[in-house]
Structure formats: structure tokens, C-alpha cells
């Protein structure tokens, strides 16, 4: 009896479908992210350099589409003003 084995390899964007999505390194001006992992599902926390403060929640998450969800930045102390209206809803970042 003769058996034929057929192996099919599917490639998407030059990557095997079994590869874990990788977001690559995220560079943050005036700050750094803890850890070294850049694969899907990774959450990294921002630390700002001396004389800078964090604006935002400071968390970066690597998504399955190989992009970082990250809405924070390090701003120089004294350059951030938070303006509150009653009952407290607006926040504005003023850059000089």
C-alpha cells in the first residue's frame, strides 16, 4: 500500500501563522518601559526620566495586530496644567 503525505505551510506576511504577534520595541521620549517582552498580550509600565512626570495611565499593551495601545507621555515638570470645570470633567494639556 502506497501512502502519500501532503504538507501545506501557510505563510502570512512572511510569518508562519503559529508565530506569536510581536509589536517590536516602543520608544518613549524622556522615559522607559519596564521589562523586555514585545509579544502579544504583554503589558509594560512607563517610568519617566528625572524632571519629567507621566501624563496618562502609563500602561502599554501589545495587541494582536502587532501595535501598541499606549496613550501616555512624559512631560517636563511645570509644563502641565490641569483645568477643572465644575463638576470636574475637563482636563487639558497645555504645551509651551
Image (cartoon, helix red, strand yellow):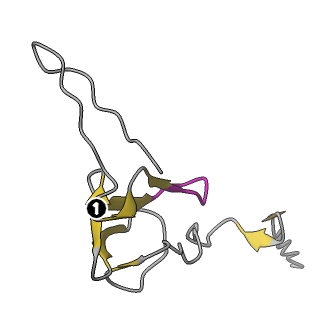
Residue 67: within the magenta?
A: yes
Secondary structure predominantly adopted by residues drawn in magenta: loop
Q: Quadrant of the N terminus?
A: bottom right
Residue 86, compared with residue 58, is above or below; it is above
Nearer to us in this view, 82 or 26 = 82
Query: At which x and y percent is residue 65?
Result: 61, 53
Height in image: 62 above or below 24? above
Mark 1 is surrounded, within 10 Å at the Cα level, by few (under 14), some (14 to 19) or many (20 or more) other residues, namely: some
> Per the image, is 89 magenta?
no
Look at 59% across and 75% down and name the residue there.
Answer: 24
Residue at the left extreme of this rendering: 87
Foreground residue among 89 and 85 = 85
Please tell me in which quadrant of the rendered image residue 72 appears: bottom left
Which residue has dot 1 on it? Answer: 54
Pick the front one: 23 or 48 = 48
Task: Name above or below for residue 43 compared with residue 64.
Answer: below
Q: Which range of residues does the magenta coloring cover?
A: 62-68
Tell me what residue is drawn at x 31 percent, y 75 percent. Answer: 48
| Left or right: where 86 falls relative to 63 | left
Q: Based on the displayed image, in which of its 4 quarters is residue 77 positioned?
A: bottom left
Residue at point 47% right, 51% down? 96
Q: What is the x, y in percent for residue 15?
A: 76, 72
Amino acid at each position: 500500500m502506497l501512502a502519500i503525505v501532503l504538507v501545506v505551510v501557510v505563510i502570512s506576511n512572511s510569518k508562519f501563522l503559529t508565530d506569536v504577534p510581536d509589536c517590536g520595541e516602543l520608544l518613549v521620549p524622556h522615559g522607559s518601559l519596564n521589562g523586555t517582552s514585545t509579544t502579544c498580550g504583554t503589558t509594560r509600565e512607563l517610568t519617566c526620566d528625572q524632571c519629567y512626570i507621566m501624563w496618562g495611565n502609563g500602561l502599554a499593551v501589545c495587541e494582536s495586530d502587532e501595535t501598541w495601545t499606549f496613550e501616555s507621555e512624559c512631560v517636563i515638570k511645570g509644563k502641565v496644567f490641569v483645568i477643572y470645570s465644575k463638576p470636574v470633567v475637563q482636563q487639558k494639556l497645555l504645551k509651551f
